[in-house]
């Protein structure tokens, strides 16, 4: 399997504002939609949370949660640590790829917000299979991402938007991926069951909770 190594250090300091310029607060609201369902989690594996806005909210609402945040970008991790200073005793970070890590013992929550679209389908398949084999029953996987809506009028507009995003990230970070993978099929094959789904912009954005029975 060939690993992609885009450099997100280049966009770390503008990432938040780029989000707001493209879709306003909708990406952030999508990430945070399922926060109320996570209050009983104890050990979170946070994959590619960027500058840490979601993780800060998660740690604020759950004062006993321990979190390991993974990212390939040193700058993103620094921004994340700064934003989560209030919970530094409950936070660990590691600069590595999600494609090679192993979940710490006791992990009961995995989050991938707008991360899996950086991987190819074979990479998403391998990631979900490998992590599922090391997780205990009852683990939740929270995934948020882009999708192409089913509506025939919206499909071409959404496809154009997604292509533009991939083009921009290819220029800015060196990202090689150019097509959305299908996390749903990968998570299903890995043994997870979808227990919640929410979408915005007619399905262009979605967030889901998956449970390992």
Image (cartoon, rainbow, N blue to C red):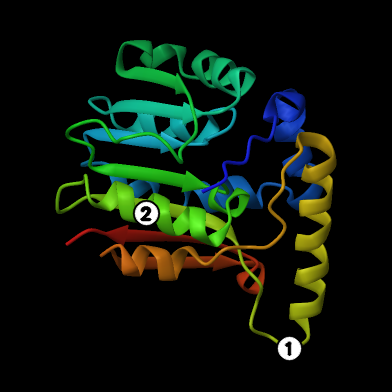
Residue in view at x 68 percent, y 52 percent: 177
Which residue is under mark 2?
Answer: 128
Residue in view at x 53 percent, y 22 percent: 80
How far from the left and from the top, in percent, is residue 212? 22, 58
Secondary structure at badge 1 equals loop
How far from the left and from the top, in percent, is residue 70? 45, 29
Chain-order first, disc 2 or disc 1: 2
Which residue is under mark 1?
Answer: 152
Q: Quadrant of residue 28?
A: top right
Residue in view at x 54 percent, y 67 percent: 199
Q: Is residue 212 above or below residue 69?
A: below
Marks 2/1: CA–CA distance = 31 Å
Do we see residue 37 in this rendering? no
The disc placed on residue 26 is none
Q: Is residue 48 above or below residue 94?
A: below
Left or right, 44 with respect to 19, comes to: left
């Amino acid at each position: 399997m060939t690993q992609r190594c885009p450099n997100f250090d280049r966009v770390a300091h503008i990432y938040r504002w780029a989000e707001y310029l493209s879709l306003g607060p909708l990406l952030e609201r999508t990430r945070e939609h399922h926060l109320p369902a996570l209050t009983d989690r104890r050990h979170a594996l946070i994959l590619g949370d960027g500058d840490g806005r979601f993780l800060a909210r998660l740690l604020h609402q759950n004062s006993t949660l321990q979190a390991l945040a993974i990212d390939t970008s040193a700058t993103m991790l620094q921004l994340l640590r700064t934003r989560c200073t209030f919970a530094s005793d409950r936070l660990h970070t590691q600069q590595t790829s999600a494609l090679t890590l192993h979940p710490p013992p006791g992990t009961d929550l995995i989050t991938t917000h707008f991360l899996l679209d950086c991987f190819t389908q074979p990479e998403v398949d391998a990631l979900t299979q490998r992590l599922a084999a090391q997780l205990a029953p009852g683990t939740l996987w929270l995934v948020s991402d882009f999708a192409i809506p089913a509506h025939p009028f919206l499909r071409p507009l959404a496809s154009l938007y997604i292509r533009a995003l991939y083009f921009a990230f290819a220029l800015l970070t060196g990202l090689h991926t150019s097509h959305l993978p299908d996390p749903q099929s990968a998570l299903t094959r890995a043994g997870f069951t979808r227990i919640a789904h929410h979408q915005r912009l007619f399905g262009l954005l979605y967030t889901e909770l998956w449970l390992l029975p």
